[in-house]
């Protein structure tokens, strides 16, 4: 059994107070710090002392520049600053995402179709933004998609991202989510390689395991590579997955790159079409693009693709902002196969006569207006006649889906999707009072009263469920300074594990509802 390395001591950073270790990798450690001004918790990624020379230091600097260029995207982890510590180690100060990453969540319980589609559209938009800036991610996988405090996915780990000019564009891949061409004698990667990884990631969220992993079977690297290269994609064994979604995943993960979607945004639109078919709320595609706004062109608000200018920060500064032009360097050259920045995303824009609100994803709505008092005859907003189009926005271009099946009205950040060809909407006449809505419905609390008792070389952890519901389970894993252990699931409120030789045994546990939603995890160490 290989021995995990001991994490390096956290560096002393002026203006920051060390809290705890978050994780370790082959090139860097990630720590939780508290920034003093402004006061907030941040994740700090620090390059290992023995990795500071040569290409690793250059790679780390490239990651800082890439994330600085893209970090204002809502589905990419925000970078606040970068620098070098007093002991000479480069570091990145990034947004702290406290919720379990998508790998941990999918292993605990498969995602609902609605949430997998939402996440897929949002992450595909982030990848499309990177492609338009000339950047290949090359390591898209559930573990590299963190979750913010607002339950939004955030793509991270651009440490092996490359451009078309890079010398070694195939190193550092993660086998279960990599396409067949990366295993060739002369490895290749491109825009369609990232599209494959996007499809593999959405498949993983729905299946609870990577696409070519056989539960209970042999899943070594050689076994996975053989299946990826030669075996067809297994169908998802779920009755709620429509044929259109299965087809979209199969196309995104085709063996030949030319058979896949040309771009990440094309894959996102395929997922949007599935949302429309299922009558789900349609997730907008947010794309950052540095091309100037066409002053004479149509800026049709209320569509499903939102294109805005890139805003970046310099790695050595506090967050600064400003419209930036595409950098005229080889490091940000356009990628082969990427959609040109100056080209419109779609040329066909359709509108339905009356938008109908469909809010099915609880994460898509932040606030609701209060219910009217009893006897109030005010027509509910969702049934009111269509609102006039808002004034043109000069901050970006909102472009149509171009499939002739839907339009959306973006109101206060919520997408209100219209039906294919909606029937005339009649104004209902309320006959009674409207029941108030629970603003915290769907909230999943963290496990409470976590206690660890050590005896006879073992530690028994117990906890309580503060709000029990039918079908509740708990996802848990042990963690040490060397990293996190394997995530496991239990329906009990107790687990027993061997005491850690260090004398300190730690566990992280979170509540998982029957529908797959999870709460924040609770951590506890004993003794």
Image (spheres, grey):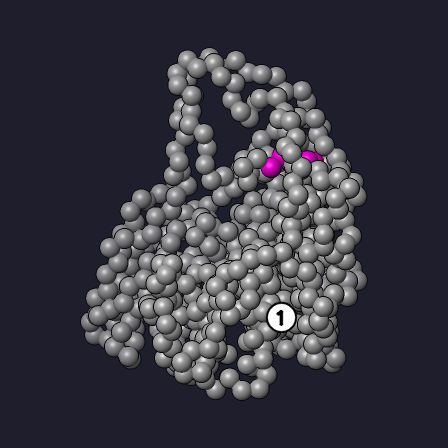
Residue sitting at 40 percent across and 70 percent down? 31
Residue sitting at 57 percent across and 35 percent down? 411
Q: Position of residue 55 (x, y in %)?
A: 59, 83
Label count reads 1
Q: Quadrant of residue 23?
A: bottom left
Mark 1 lies on a secondary structure that is: loop
Q: Position of residue 187 (x, y in %)?
A: 72, 77
Q: Is residue 407 magenta?
A: yes
Q: Is residue 365 magenta?
A: no
Compared to 172, does 136 lie above or below?
Answer: above
Compared to 234, does 362 lie above or below?
Answer: above
Q: Main secondary structure of the magenta part?
A: strand
Residue sitting at 63 percent across and 32 percent down? 390
97 or 329: nearer the viewer: 329
Side (left or right) of 471 relative to 119: left
- The residue under label 1 is 161
Q: Quadrant of residue 165?
A: bottom right
220 or 360: nearer the viewer: 360
189 or 82: nearer the viewer: 82
Q: Is residue 107 visible?
A: no
Side (left or right) of 177 relative to 110: right
286 or 249: nearer the viewer: 286
Side (left or right) of 52 relative to 486: right
Q: Quadrant of residue 324?
A: bottom right
Please state, as top left, top right, bottom left or bottom right, where the C terminus lies in the image: bottom left
Residue sitting at 56 percent across and 81 percent down? 56
Q: Position of residue 469 (x, y in %)?
A: 35, 43
Please state, as top left, top right, bottom left or bottom right, where the N terminus lies in the image: bottom left
Q: Which residues are magenta?
A: 406-410
Q: Position of residue 292 (x, y in %)?
A: 72, 52
Q: Is residue 439 visible?
A: yes
Q: Residues within 10 Å of mark 1 (few under 14, many from 20)?
A: many
């Amino acid at each position: 059994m290989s021995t995990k390395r001991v994490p390096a001591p956290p560096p002393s950073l002026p203006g920051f107070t060390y809290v705890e270790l978050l994780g370790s990798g082959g090139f860097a450690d990630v720590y939780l710090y508290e920034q003093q001004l402004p006061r907030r918790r941040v994740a700090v990624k620090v390059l290992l002392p023995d990795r500071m020379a040569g290409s690793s230091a250059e790679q780390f600097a490239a990651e800082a520049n890439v994330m600085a260029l893209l970090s204002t995207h809502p589905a990419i982890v925000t970078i606040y600053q970068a620098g070098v510590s007093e002991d000479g180690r480069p570091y990145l100060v990034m947004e702290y995402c406290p919720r379990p990453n998508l790998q941990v969540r999918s292993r605990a319980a498969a995602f609902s179709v609605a949430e997998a589609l939402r996440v897929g559209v949002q992450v595909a938009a982030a990848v499309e933004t990177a492609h338009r800036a000339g950047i290949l991610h090359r390591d898209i996988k559930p573990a590299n998609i963190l979750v913010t405090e607002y339950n939004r996915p955030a793509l991270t780990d651009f440490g092996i991202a490359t451009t078309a000019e890079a010398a070694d564009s195939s190193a550092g891949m993660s086998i279960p989510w990599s396409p067949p061409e990366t295993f060739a004698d002369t490895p290749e990667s491109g825009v369609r390689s990232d599209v494959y990884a996007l499809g593999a990631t959405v498949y993983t969220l729905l299946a609870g395991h990577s696409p070519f992993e056989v539960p209970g079977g042999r899943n070594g690297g050689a076994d996975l590579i053989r299946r990826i290269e030669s075996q067809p994609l297994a169908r998802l064994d779920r009755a709620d997955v429509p044929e259109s979604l299965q087809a979209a995943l199969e196309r995104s993960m085709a063996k030949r790159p030319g058979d896949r979607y040309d771009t990440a945004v094309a894959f996102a639109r395929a997922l949007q079409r599935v949302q429309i078919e299922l009558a789900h709320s349609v997730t907008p595609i947010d794309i950052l693009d540095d091309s100037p706004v066409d002053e004479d062109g149509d800026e049709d608000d209320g569509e499903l693709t939102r294109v805005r200018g890139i805003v970046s920060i310099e790695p050595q500064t506090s967050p600064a902002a400003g419209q930036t032009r595409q950098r005229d360097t080889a490091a940000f050259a356009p990628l082969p196969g990427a959609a040109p920045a100056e080209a419109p995303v779609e040329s066909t824009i359709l509108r339905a006569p009356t938008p109908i609100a469909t809010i099915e994803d609880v994460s898509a709505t932040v606030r609701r207006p209060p219910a009217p008092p009893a006897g109030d005859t005010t027509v509910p907003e969702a049934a009111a006649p269509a609102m006039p189009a808002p004034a043109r926005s000069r901050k970006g271009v909102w472009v149509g889906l171009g499939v002739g099946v839907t339009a959306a009205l973006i109101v206060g950040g919520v997408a209100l999707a219209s039906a294919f060809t909606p029937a005339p909407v009649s104004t209902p006449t309320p006959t009674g009072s409207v029941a108030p809505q629970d603003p915290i419905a769907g909230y999943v609390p963290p496990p409470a009263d976590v206690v660890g008792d050590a005896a006879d070389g073992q530690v028994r952890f117990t906890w309580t469920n503060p709000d029990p519901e039918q079908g509740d389970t708990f996802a848990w894993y042990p963690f040490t300074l060397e990293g996190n252990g394997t995530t496991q699931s239990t329906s009990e409120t107790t687990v027993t594990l061997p005491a850690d030789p260090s004398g300190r045994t730690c566990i992280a546990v979170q509540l998982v509802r029957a529908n797959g939603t999870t709460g924040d995890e609770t951590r506890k160490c004993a003794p």
